[in-house]
Amino acid sequence: MLSLGKQLAVAALLVLAAGCSSSFGAPKGKGKTMNMTKINFSDYGAVKDGSANAKDAFKAAFDACRAKGNCELVIEPGVYLISDPEAIKLRDAVMSLKDKSQDEGTIFQFYFPYVTGLDMRNLKNVKVTAKGVTILCEGFMEPVTLEGSKNVCIEGLNISYKRLPFTQGVITKVEKDYYDVKLDEDTPLTEGAALS
């Protein structure tokens, strides 16, 4: 089974690598694009420096895309935080190794009830232009959900995590009965986690 990081990387590559063709949005068999209504994500009040949760702004923008259809959502370059208390709770449960019902074998399954980051379910004829955009997920979540969508193109979107799903460090001292480890600041040990 692929690790979470590899699963996310494969999913992101499948969705994002191809880009949008020049005839995106055109009726079948036609080479020209139809006029697409432009929706500016900046109209929904998201902060693009990663300092504030943009989840509600994305929800409102994708709701507008669902209502209009045949549209292009333009997201300004920047870093947008997507945070959710349930996703953080799941991350902490997994990282602490305390709750065996939240182990890798359980949560890395298709249709595990993850929190959704960018809910793009049931979009029709939507192009998302996200060149220079990074979604910074906080907690274990499904970063992008496209279930039930048709003719959706995502261009340029990067996905990363505020807290990476591992802890790492450098062994600084080894003795007969113990060793000292200096943990990296950006991958701290979750409170209560066992070292192995």
Image: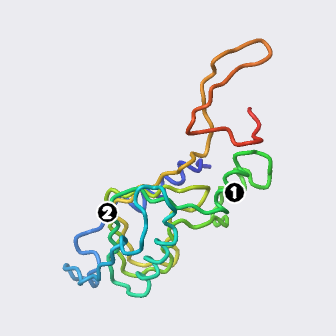
Name the residue rendered at 43%, 59% in the picture: 14
- The amino acid beneath tag 2 is Gly
Viewer-proximal residue, 175 or 31?
Answer: 175
Along the horizontal axis of the image, is 109 left or right of 80?
right
Name the residue rendered at 30%, 67% in the picture: 20
Which residue is denoted by mark 2 in the rendering? Answer: 19
- The amino acid beneath tag 1 is Leu
Tell me the number on the disc at residue 90. 1
Where in the figure is residue 59, as x and y percent of width and height?
A: 49, 75
Which residue is farthest left?
32
Mark 1 closeness class: few <14, some 14–19, many ≥20 residues within 10 Å: some
Viewer-proximal residue, 48 or 95?
Answer: 48
Q: What element carries label 1?
A: helix
Viewer-proximal residue, 89 or 195?
Answer: 89
Mark 2 closeness class: few <14, some 14–19, many ≥20 residues within 10 Å: some
**Cα gap from disc 2 to disc 1, whole angstroms:** 32 Å
Where in the figure is residue 61, as x and y percent of width and height?
A: 43, 76
Which residue is farthest top?
176
Report the colour scheme.
rainbow
Where in the figure is residue 147, as x and y percent of width and height?
A: 52, 74
Viewer-proximal residue, 41 or 194?
Answer: 41
Name the residue rendered at 69%, 46% in the picture: 95
In the displayed structure, would residue 113 be above or below residue 61?
above
